Structure formats: C-alpha cells, structure tokens
C-alpha cells in the first residue's frame, strides 16, 4: 500500500486546497493529511480564523482524505516516517527554495519522495483574508455582529 502525506493549516478552505488533496490521492492508496494545530499556526506568526478541531473535521470529511491527523510541529520528515509515507505532497510555491532543496536530500535519504503540485493561481487563504479584511474594514460592507446573531435564531 502506497501512503502519501501532506500538511497544511487548511484555514478558509478553498479550491486550491481541494486540488492538492485530489491530486495527492491520485498518487497513493492512502492519503493522510496533517492539519496544523492552533499552537503551531501561532508559532509561525499567524492566526487561524477557523479553530483547529473544526479544520480537522472539515479535512477529515473530504472524500480524497483517508485520515486527518494533528501536525503540531514543523518536522514533516518525522511524521512521514511515523506514518510510513512514501510521498510528501506540497504546493510548488516551495519548489527550488534552498530550504526545500535541503529537505529533498533528507527525504530522499529516508526513501520518501517529495511531489510538488502546481499552485492554484488566483486563490489562496492569504488573498481571501485580505478580501475579507477589506470588507470588514468598510462600514458599508462589514457584517455587524447583531446581524449574525439575530433574534430569528
């Protein structure tokens, strides 16, 4: 059985995430997805909009995903070894960087291949966050808390 692994925050889930998971599942029998914990997101200097447990459940529910697990540190090599993964799937925005060239050597020594998938152009959590920020910051378009929690509920 060929096991593949990928990991991400999966905050503000979008079609780029789905494309990566779909392509990854096409290359392995079992796809295990690491979902970055809230503590690790904060460590990386960011903040997730969606809580970890919700993100984990969203990813777990996707038909291409066989299992979702917490990714609580930056060490994807150890996770791949622990899970018996033959492949690590990542977006090609990492391809060719010094950091990932070094990772490729380390993973190759462990018998694990890194596969880069094309980044989905025009969509990212960063772009979605920027767009939402512009909407939130504009009094005309901002969603008011009282409209979200109306008496109709």
Image: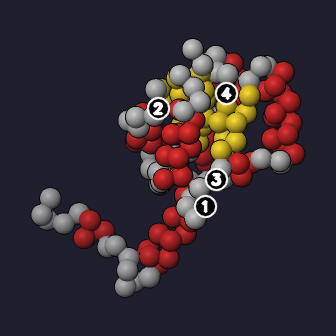
Query: Where residue 29 sits: x, y (%)?
Result: 53, 22
Q: Is residue 126 visible in this depiction of the protein?
A: no
Q: Which residue is mark 3?
A: 119
Q: Looking at the image, do the residues carrying marks 1 and 3 touch, with CB atoms under 8 Å apart?
A: yes
Q: Marks 1 and 3, Cα distance to the nearest angstrom?
A: 6 Å
Quadrant in which the C terminus appears: bottom left
Q: Which residue is mark 1?
A: 121
Query: Where residue 18 sits: x, y (%)?
Result: 49, 46
Q: Marks 3 and 4, Cα distance to the nearest angstrom?
A: 18 Å
Left or right: 5, with 141 as reference point:
right
Q: Marks 2 and 4, Cα distance to the nearest angstrom?
A: 15 Å
Q: Looking at the image, do the residues carrying marks 2 and 4 touch, with CB atoms under 8 Å apart?
A: no
Give the mark, 2 or 1, whose residue is nearer the N terminus: 2
Query: Where residue 114 sits: x, y (%)?
Result: 73, 33
Snapshot colouring = secondary structure
Q: Which residue is mark 4?
A: 87
In the structure shown, which secondary structural element does the residue marked by tag 2 occupy?
Answer: loop
Q: Is residue 54 visible in this depiction of the protein?
A: yes
């Amino acid at each position: 059985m060929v096991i593949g692994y990928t990991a991400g925050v999966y905050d503000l889930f979008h079609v780029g995430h789905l494309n990566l998971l779909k392509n990854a599942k096409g290359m392995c029998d079992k796809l295990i997805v690491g979902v970055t914990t809230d503590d690790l997101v904060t460590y990386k200097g960011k903040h997730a909009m969606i809580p970890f447990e919700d993100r984990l459940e969203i990813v777990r529910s996707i038909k291409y995903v066989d299992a979702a697990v917490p990714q609580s540190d930056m060490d994807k090599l150890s996770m791949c070894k622990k899970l018996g993964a033959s492949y690590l799937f990542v977006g090609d925005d990492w391809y060719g960087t010094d950091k990932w060239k070094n990772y490729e050597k380390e993973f190759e020594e462990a018998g694990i291949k890194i596969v880069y998938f094309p980044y989905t152009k025009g969509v990212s959590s960063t772009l979605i966050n920027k767009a939402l920020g512009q909407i939130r910051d504009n009094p005309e378009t901002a969603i008011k808390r009282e409209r979200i929690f109306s008496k109709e509920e």
